[in-house]
Every structure is written in structure tokens, then in C-alpha cells.
Image (tube, rainbow, N blue to C red):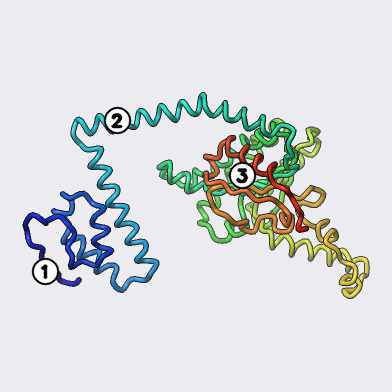
């Protein structure tokens, strides 16, 4: 560590030292004066040494953490540990909780009713695809010790969202629950927990009232036997569902893999007929491949919703979503509200679809 001359005590003690790099002076300014008086020299020397020689990404993380520490220190000082500070902090938390409760009980219902009124008579999607992202980040935000519990809350929330779809008159829903990449790269303990959650969802919930006919998209060979069996049983149990509602669970799913499997199936089909590759190359159409997709016989999604603020498809329904409208929501999946859902439908209704034309 570089040895720095100590600062001179005096009236300026606690202020940024002009010998420090500019970014150190700026960051020190984020901290309370008393904190700078006590720790300023050591902090400036340590931060300078850590940043020097670090990669750009590491420097950004270090500086962000340093700024965050200053903001947190000022917040703690503002709330204080004195009686006055404790009372003020308690009152602030109480007021915030009261506002949230007021919004939940009175404001949101009115807003939801207004959104439904705006959607009445409008164009709604026939098929909605949902990328339910952000379960683990939501669990971390809630302070849960086991982040995998986010998957449990997310799966339970999926049933509630299906109820919103039913109420809105949406008859086809595809839910991206677990990707092929998740199975290949996530921790084995997390994957095992997620598989149990999916089994509970399809066995105890989706097949209970037979509101939705269940379909599966994905490679079942990648799944544990118990999960694959539960999914197959859900498909069979809901086969006679007469509501007209269809929910497709994408488990062990990948859009690229689906297209490869569809093309492979098409080749096998024509090989059995004795069709040559040249003949197939001359006659193949997009409809030929679509007949072999996991979602064969279902309409393509009109709207794809992704939660958590990420703005990408992540290998979800790549073929089917060629002309889909996309909607990205900042909320993590378990925190996705009916208000957010209705806003997505309102956004869709306001768009003019061109289908690539």
C-alpha cells in the first residue's frame, strides 16, 4: 500500500484533501463530516490503492460500493440513534406503510377498474407469452435466506396471473418456467427445488379445477423422471377441458433447440415417405416446420411480456414470436401486479401491428 503523508489537523480537517485524486475527493464528499474526520485519511489511501491497477469493471464496482457506503452513512446519521432520530425514523416508516396500504386498498382498485374500462372494446391479444423473470432477485430484495424460495412464490403467482388472463378473455397463455440453459448451468440444488415447485404447481393447482388445458413445450428427457411424469399427467388430466383455455408450460425449453428438433422431425417424416433431400429443399415451407414445433396447432403469441426489467427474449419462442409485440416491465415476477398486466394489455391495444410489412 502506498504511504501517504498524514493530514494536518486544523479547521479544514474532515474536508477533502486536494492531494487526493479527484474521484476520491468526490466520493469522500458523500460521507458525513464527522466520518471523514475520523476515517478520511485511511479511506482515501485504501481506495486509491485498490483502484490503482484494477480492471475497469473492478474499478466501477469499487467506486459504486464506496458511493453507496457514503449514502448509507448519511441516511443512518439522518435517522439517528437518538430518541428524536428513532421517533422520526419510526414515523417515516409508519407513514410509508400507511400510504402503501391506502394505495393497495383504495387507489389500485379504482385504477384497475379504469384500466379495464379503457380496454373494453379494444383489441386484445389472443395469445400471451410470459417470461417470468426475477424470482431470485425478488427473494433477495425480500431478505429471504433461501433465494430459491423466489421460485415457489413465482409459481404460486403464475396461477393468479392465469386468473387475470381468464378474466380478460385471453385464451392462450405460454409461461416460460425453466429454460434448457437453466437446467444445464444452474446449481443442482436450485434446479431440484425448482422441479419440485413445478411438480406441485401442475399436480395440485392447474389440474384441480380444469380451467386450462395444459400443454408442454420443452425437452422432457432433460427433466427428472418425477417432473416429466407430473407434466405428462397434467396434459392427460386436462385433455377434456372444455373452457377453451390453453396454457403451455415451457420447461426445459429453448427456442433454438425447438427449431432444430422440428426440422429433424420433418426430415424423419419425409425420409419415411422416400422424399429426397433435393425434393424437400424445393418444397419446404414455414408451415411445414411449424407443424413440428412444440406449439403446433396453437396461434403464435401476439404479445410477449417479460418482467424484471431485462429487455431480451432469452431463447423464448424465437420462431413463434417473429411478429409478436414485446412489453418489458420493471417489476420482478412475484411482484408483478394486475395493474402491470393491464398496462401491458393497454400498450398492446394502442399499437398498430404491421407483421413485418
Identity of the residue drawn at 52% across and 46% down: 330
Residue 249 seen in this snapshot = no
Quarter of the figure that contains the N terminus: bottom left
Which of pointers 2 and 3 indicates the residue nearer the eye? 2
Residue 323 lies, in percent from the top left, at: 73, 54
Tag 3 residue: 198
The disc label shown at residue 277, or none: none
Residue 325 lies, in percent from the top left, at: 68, 50
Q: In this view, does 195 lie to the left or right of 11?
A: right
Q: Quadrant of residue 185?
A: bottom right
Q: How crowded is mark 3: few (under 14 residues within 10 Å), some or many (20 or more)?
A: many
How far, Cα to Cα, is label 1 from label 2? 43 Å
The disc label shown at residue 90, or none: 2
The disc label shown at residue 5, or none: 1
Identity of the residue drawn at 29% across and 57% down: 66
Q: How crowded is mark 2: few (under 14 residues within 10 Å), some or many (20 or more)?
A: few
Residue 1 seen in this snapshot = yes
Vertical arrangement, residue 187 with respect to residue 55, above or below: above
Amino acid at each position: 500500500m502506498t504511504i501517504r503523508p498524514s493530514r494536518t489537523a486544523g479547521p479544514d480537517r474532515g474536508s477533502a484533501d486536494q492531494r487526493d485524486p479527484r474521484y476520491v475527493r468526490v466520493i469522500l464528499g458523500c460521507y458525513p463530516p464527522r466520518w471523514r474526520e475520523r476515517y478520511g485519511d485511511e479511506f482515501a489511501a485504501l481506495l486509491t490503492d485498490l483502484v490503482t491497477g484494477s480492471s475497469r469493471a473492478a474499478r466501477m464496482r469499487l467506486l459504486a460500493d464506496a458511493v453507496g457506503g457514503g449514502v448509507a452513512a448519511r441516511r443512518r446519521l439522518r435517522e439517528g440513534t437518538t430518541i428524536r432520530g428513532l421517533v422520526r425514523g419510526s414515523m417515516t416508516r409508519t407513514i410509508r406503510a400507511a400510504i402503501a396500504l391506502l394505495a393497495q386498498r383504495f387507489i389500485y382498485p379504482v385504477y384497475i377498474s379504469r384500466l379495464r374500462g379503457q380496454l373494453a372494446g379494444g383489441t386484445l391479444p389472443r395469445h400471451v407469452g410470459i417470461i417470468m423473470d426475477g424470482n431470485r432477485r425478488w427473494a433477495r430484495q425480500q431478505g429471504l435466506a433461501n433465494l430459491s424460495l423466489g421460485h415457489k412464490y413465482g409459481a404460486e403467482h403464475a396461477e393468479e396471473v392465469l386468473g387475470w388472463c381468464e378474466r380478460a378473455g385471453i385464451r392462450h397463455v405460454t409461461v416460460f418456467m425453466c429454460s434448457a440453459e437453466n437446467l444445464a448451468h444452474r446449481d443442482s440444488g436450485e434446479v431440484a427445488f425448482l422441479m419440485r415447485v413445478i411438480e406441485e404447481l401442475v399436480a395440485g393447482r392447474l389440474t384441480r379445477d380444469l380451467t386450462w388445458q395444459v400443454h408442454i413445450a420443452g425437452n422432457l428427457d432433460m427433466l427428472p423422471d418425477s417432473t416429466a411424469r407430473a407434466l405428462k399427467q397434467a396434459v392427460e388430466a386436462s385433455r377434456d377441458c372444455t373452457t377453451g383455455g390453453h396454457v403451455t408450460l415451457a420447461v426445459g425449453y429453448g427456442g433454438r433447440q425447438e427449431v432444430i428438433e422440428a426440422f429433424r422431425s420433418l426430415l424423419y417424416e419425409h425420409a419415411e415417405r422416400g422424399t429426397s433431400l433435393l425434393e424437400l429443399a424445393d418444397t419446404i415451407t414455414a408451415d411445414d416446420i411449424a407443424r413440428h414445433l412444440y406449439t403446433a396447432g396453437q396461434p403464435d403469441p401476439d404479445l410477449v411480456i417479460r418482467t424484471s426489467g431485462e429487455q431480451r427474449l432469452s431463447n423464448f419462442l424465437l420462431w413463434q414470436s417473429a411478429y409478436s409485440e414485446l412489453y418489458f416491465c420493471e417489476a420482478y415476477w412475484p411482484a408483478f401486479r394486475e395493474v402491470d398486466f393491464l398496462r401491458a394489455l393497454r400498450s398492446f391495444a394502442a399499437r398498430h401491428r404491421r407483421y413485418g410489412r
